[in-house]
Image (cartoon, rainbow, N blue to C red):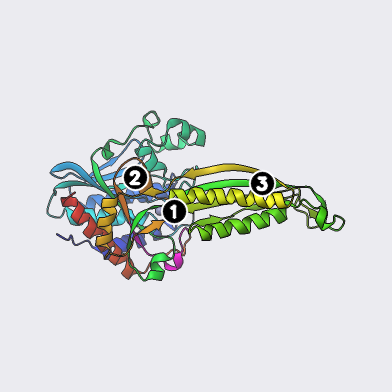
Amino acid sequence: MTPAVDAAAVIARLREADVRSGGRREAWGAPWAAERERLVEHARALVPGVEIERDAFANLWFVVPGRRAETLLLASHVDCVPGGGWLDGILGVHAGLGVLAALTTDGPGERTIAVADWADEEGTRFGRSLLGSSMATGQATRAEIDGLGAAAVLAEHGVVLDRLGERSPRLAHVAAALELHIEQGPILERAGRACAAVSGCLGVRRLAFALTGAAGHAGATPMADRRDPVRAAAEAIAAIGDAGEGLDGYATVGRVEAEPAIPTAIAQRCAFTVDLRHPERDRLVALERAAADAADAAAERHGCGVERRLLWEIDPIAFDSTLVERAVRATGGGAPVVSGPLHDSAALARAGIPAAMVFAPSIGGISHTRAEDTAETDLAEAIATFARLAGELAVSP
Ligand SMILES: [Zn+2]
């Protein structure tokens, strides 16, 4: 049966939370902690009999046990980037509580239903994204937390450091995990869709290149004698962009630095970063090879050397195919989209927990700023669709 989620009330609570916190819900900060306290009060008032718990990894859980321990999890994150918007993350938590209330109006159902607020999705303070969900799934270890210099702050917020590497017991019976989130890109808006199923997250290869040549005077060194690393880098960067287009992926050079960076001198060295993304692993690897080949070829043409270093990599993450299929049907049958940004659901999927997401559109594809927005009609439809999908999964696998 379709639960009657009060989407207007969910939207109103999101607006109130934004007025209170003003886009300052960075994890481990005071406005974030205060907003989570409000969430606890709100859940108590909205969902009679809800069990509220903070796990050993600072994640908040709101649980209504069903006749079976088998659990449907609806989870996202309250935290945001500094100066963030009113929807990134917190939408999925408030929508989750709204759906939890709707599904348990007549008392406990078949499956246990849980809503979770993962601590620190954005990684603003310690540079580690998906922190709460990674700790809950045992993927963030004590050594990693120590390496980030995060241990003392996490302990202050109730993280039991000795238990890092273990799984949150609340995850033991999760049979399906759903997350409602804004797209943060332009695809849904362009397609005129109020929501869409998400089939997974793009894989990433992030590299640092440095081309080394020979410094010289801009007016005295003949063009034919030059070993100019900036000119070589320019050719490499253009070819890397072409490779991104040609392989239907994403290729971004976000930072370029010449040394010594003097207008009247040929540089000695030119360093640049390359961020490559693709939904398919094979093509991501091909894109990485194309980027390396482009740098090598350009360097050779200009008599330069090449240094290459891998900064970070993650393979593409596919969500659970059965859940994605159900989300596709719930959202009206349109093709699922692949998320460019990573999400907590990716941490769950990597840990073997069946997960899927539903996206609502972002106006202008804008997020991580105060200008982030979604039309209320689209939000209401996305929340209602999410509730319908959750309603199905609350009673049957
Ligand atoms: Zn988010």
Name the amino acid, label 1: Pro
Q: Do the residues labelled 1 and 3 touch (CB within 8 Å)?
A: no
Q: What element carries label 1?
A: loop
Residue 95, placed above or below residue 147 = below
Mark 3 or mark 2, which has the lower sequence index? 3
Q: In this view, does 6 lie above or below 107?
A: below
Residue beneath label 3, please? 210
| Residue beneath disc 1 | 341
Q: Which of marks 1 and 3 is nearer the N terminus?
A: 3
Is 364 in the magenta? yes
Q: Indicate left or right for 387 with 183 as reference.
A: left
Mark 2 and ligand 1: say if the CB distance to the nearest ligand atom is below 8 Å: no
Report the front residue among 177 and 58: 177
Q: Which residue is at 32% across, 41% downward? A: 352
Q: Which residue is drawn at 32% across and 44% down?
A: 60
Q: Is residue 222 above or below residue 345?
A: below
Q: Position of residue 339 (x, y in %)?
A: 41, 56
